[in-house]
């Protein structure tokens, strides 16, 4: 029978925090900047943690950094553990009339240019109300957000309206308009806009998104996608190559349109809107801090719509 783990000390907590940071930065080298310590110190702390737990948590070497099966489970439990600690601090702080702790927020890319997005105002309002809460803002691919919410790696996210686990609740904040774009080196770029038929567009090589988006144009193309991207920047690179057409947010593509590097194809016909929503687990399990930030998001976007 294996002996139980002795009570955790401050040293253990520090090592677990280092472990979490290493995992989230995908390796020792990348974690140095965030932790402010050397790679050799990180390695020593990780070795000490593995000895303390009696488990091998990760593999590191020429093949790169990866978690073992035990490491994956310990990481998941570490996330839950620190979330519980933060929630405890938050609840005690609330009893004393002061919210404290950390709030981890996920945001999809390419929303900062959207004039309808008021995330910056929500952050300002939240920080003014609860200045002692540390905000961690992560740019996350839409296909990762559901997993990270369910595993409590984040509590709040801004994500396109898309199918999600039933435990994830969505509330609309604002919209973004999407158009189909081609790059300046694409054969359709110089074509007469009025003469570009849907039939001709349907024959083009296109780049799809690596996550589900409900649109009325999912069956537009006559063949399978020729490329895939999991964020807007990746799609923009594919469009700018001149080899593919793809849907992009109009506000995001505008810089390249103005520079003559992209154009929208038949925006009169190939245009749709996507709702951007605040996503979180049921309010009954949200921390006070997360609820406060959610309220700020909804308030500032409601004011912007007036």
Image (cartoon, rainbow, N blue to C red):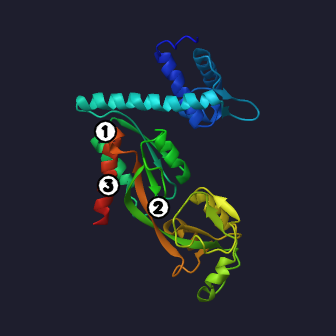
Label 1, label 3: how many angstroms apart (C-alpha)? 15 Å
Sequence order check, earlier mark of 2 and 1: 2
Mark 3 and mark 2: Cα distance apart in space: 19 Å
Under tag 1, what secondary structure? helix
**Disc 1 marks which residue?**
288
The picture places residue 98, in percent across and down from the top left corner, at 26, 33
Query: 175 or 211, which is in the foreground?
Result: 211
Residue located 41% across and 57% down the image = 277
Q: Residue at x 55, y 10 (%)?
A: 3
In the image, residue 78 sits, relative to residue 164, either above or below, namely above
Reading the image, the residue beneath label 3 is: 298
Query: On the picture, is 113 further left or further right than 69?
Result: left
Q: In which quadrant will I find the N terminus?
A: top right
Marker disc for residue 113: 2
Q: Nearer the viewer, mark 2 or mark 1?
A: 1
Q: CA distance from mark 2 to mark 1?
A: 30 Å
203 horizontally vs 292: left or right: right
Q: Secondary structure at mark 3?
A: helix
Asked whether disc 1 touches disc 3, contact meaning CB atoms under 8 Å apart, the reply is no
Q: Residue furthest right?
A: 62
Residue 228 visible (yes or no): yes
* Foreground: disc 3 or disc 2: 3
């Amino acid at each position: 029978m294996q002996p139980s783990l002795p009570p955790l000390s401050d040293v253990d907590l520090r090592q677990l925090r280092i472990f979490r940071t290493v995992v989230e930065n995908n390796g020792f080298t990348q974690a140095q900047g965030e932790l402010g310590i050397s790679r050799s110190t990180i390695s020593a702390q990780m070795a000490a943690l593995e000895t303390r737990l009696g488990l091998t948590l990760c593999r590191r070497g020429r093949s790169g950094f990866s978690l073992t099966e035990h490491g994956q489970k310990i990481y998941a439990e570490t996330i839950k553990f620190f979330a519980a600690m933060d929630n405890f601090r938050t609840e005690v702080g609330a009893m004393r009339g002061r919210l404290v702790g950390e709030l981890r927020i996920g945001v999809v890319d390419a929303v900062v240019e959207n004039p309808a997005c008021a995330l910056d105002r929500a952050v300002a309002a939240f920080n003014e109300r609860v200045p002692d809460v540390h905000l961690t803002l992560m740019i996350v691919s839409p296909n990762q957000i559901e997993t990270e919410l369910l595993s409590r790696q984040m509590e709040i996210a801004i994500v396109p309206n898309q199918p999600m686990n039933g435990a994830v609740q969505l509330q609309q904040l604002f919209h973004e308009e999407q158009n189909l774009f081609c790059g300046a080196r694409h054969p359709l770029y110089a074509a007469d806009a009025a003469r570009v038929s849907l039939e001709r567009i349907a024959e083009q090589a296109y780049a799809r998104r690596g996550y589900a988006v409900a649109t009325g144009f999912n069956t537009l193309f006559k063949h399978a996608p020729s490329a895939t991207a999991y964020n807007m920047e990746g799609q923009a690179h594919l469009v700018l190559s001149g080899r593919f057409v793809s849907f992009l947010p109009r506000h995001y593509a505008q810089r390249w349109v103005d520079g003559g590097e992209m154009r929208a194809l038949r925006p009169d016909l190939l245009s749709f809107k996507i709702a951007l929503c605040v996503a979180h687990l049921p309010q009954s399990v949200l921390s006070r801090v997360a609820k406060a930030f959610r309220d700020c998001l909804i308030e500032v976007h409601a004011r912007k719509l007036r």
